[in-house]
């Protein structure tokens, strides 16, 4: 008889397989020509997010920058890496502007990003809650700024700042953070086709607007997000980089994997398997469970120090992808194994 976790895991695997089939089925009549491929790898682990070391972003960007060129036939001179202090909002926009002057219509830009993000209103509520209740004037001022922000329904991308911004609307105005719409508009200025890969918690929900923005722009034809709605993006077992990124890089070296699409399909399934295994051993304080899942009852089964298991759907992440033209998924892999 299957256990609850086994049944849930099978469901997740079936969902992953279905999502892969659904993504392939969405296509456009236009298909990009063959040209030069460029890679822009961006990693942002701000120092004020102490639970995620800066090295996580550095390791992930370095690994992508080292392995993608051999696998996808990218010249080393066409690889750009930006991590942490190098990856401020203004610097990223400046780099995209330079690329828009470099790429031609037949070229391809692959953008890999690891960072934090969320809906603007959730960030706004979070920072308002951090202001002490006794400081009524500051609390009211921040609340007014956030409420009057014209794009309070937007999702935002959190780029590097040395210290933690306290007013989300000002962080957007000063481009410390970028709205998804602004970021995608910068990508859309590039003449060639753009593939976007993001490894982030809840990347499919919080960055669903990425897909909504990109699907009406024919040049941005591929989106890959590492986690589903309300799911965390786990670390690999060594805790050196995100789990999905490590699984994708491993898949590039398998002798039975011949295209980038096959590497994605393999890494999506192995990410689910590894994440489910991690999730079965994961515990969080019961008080944190109440705060994170206010609509759910706290599990009755607790450890001696009042820890409980999180819901399987929360930590057993399922990556998702959409390829409109088929260019990225059909791209052959190169390298020593060939």
Image (cartoon, rainbow, N blue to C red):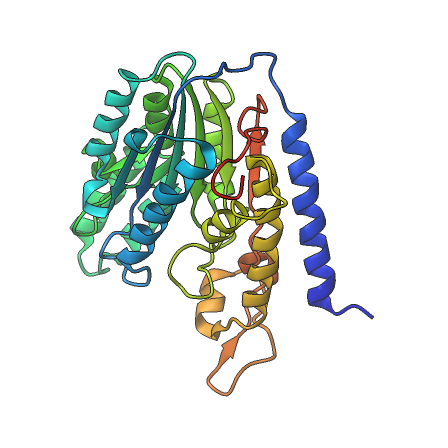
Horizontal and vertical percent position of residue 20: 65, 38
In the image shown, does 202 or 61 lie closer to the viewer?
A: 61
> Residue 321's quadrant in the figure?
top right
> On the rendered structure, is 129 left or right of 309?
left
Classify 150 as above or below 17: above
Classify 312 as above or below 116: below
Regarding residue 119, the answer to whether it shows in the image is no
Horizontal and vertical percent position of residue 85: 19, 45
Classify 18 as above or below 131: above
Q: Residue at x 39, y 38 (%)?
A: 112
Q: Residue at x 27, y 44 (%)?
A: 143
Q: How many dots with numbers?
A: 0
> On the rendered structure, is 138 left or right of 254?
left
> Residue 173's quadrant in the figure?
top left
Which residue in the rendered view is the most extreme toward the bottom? 304
Q: Residue at x 45, y 17 (%)?
A: 219
> Residue 75's quadrant in the figure?
top left
Give the position of the C terminus as an image quadrant.
top right
> On the rendered structure, is 287 left or right of 300?
left
Give the position of the N terminus as an image quadrant.
bottom right
Regarding residue 280, the answer to whether it shows in the image is yes
Horizontal and vertical percent position of residue 273: 61, 59
Horizontal and vertical percent position of residue 228: 55, 46
In the image shown, does 182 or 263 lie closer to the viewer?
A: 263
């Amino acid at each position: 008889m299957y256990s609850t976790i086994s049944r849930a895991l099978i469901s997740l695997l079936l969902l992953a397989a279905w999502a892969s089939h659904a993504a392939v089925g969405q296509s456009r009549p236009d298909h990009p020509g063959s040209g030069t491929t460029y890679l822009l790898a961006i990693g942002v682990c701000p120092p004020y997010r102490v639970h995620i070391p800066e090295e996580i972003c550095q390791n992930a960007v370095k690994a992508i920058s080292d392995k993608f060129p051999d696998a996808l036939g990218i010249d080393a001179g066409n690889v750009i890496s930006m991590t942490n202090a190098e990856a401020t909002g203004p610097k990223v926009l400046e780099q995209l502007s330079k690329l828009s002057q470099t790429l031609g219509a037949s070229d391809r830009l692959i953008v890999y990003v690891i960072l934090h993000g969320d809906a603007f209103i959730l960030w706004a509520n979070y920072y308002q809650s951090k202001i002490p209740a006794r400081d009524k004037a500051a609390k009211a001022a921040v609340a007014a700024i956030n409420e009057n922000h014209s794009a309070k329904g937007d999702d935002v991308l959190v780029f590097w700042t040395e210290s933690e911004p306290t007013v989300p609307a000002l962080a957007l105005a000063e481009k410390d953070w970028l709205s998804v719409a602004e970021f995608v508009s910068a990508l859309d200025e590039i003449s060639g086709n753009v593939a976007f890969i993001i490894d982030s918690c809840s990347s499919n929900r919080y960055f669903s607007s990425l897909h909504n923005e990109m699907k009406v722009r024919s040049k941005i034809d591929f989106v890959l997000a590492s986690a589903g709605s309300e799911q965390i993006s786990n670390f690999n077992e060594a805790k050196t980089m995100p789990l999905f990124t490590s699984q994708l890089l491993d898949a590039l070296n398998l002798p039975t994997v011949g295209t980038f699409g096959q590497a994605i399909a393999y890494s999506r399934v192995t990410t689910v398997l590894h994440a489910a295994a991690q999730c079965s051993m994961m515990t969080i304080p019961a008080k944190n469970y109440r705060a994170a899942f206010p609509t759910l009852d706290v599990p009755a089964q607790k450890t001696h120090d009042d820890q409980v298991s999180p819901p399987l759907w929360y930590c057993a992440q399922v990556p998702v992808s959409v390829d409109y033209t088929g260019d990225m998924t059909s791209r052959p892999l190169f390298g020593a194994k060939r």
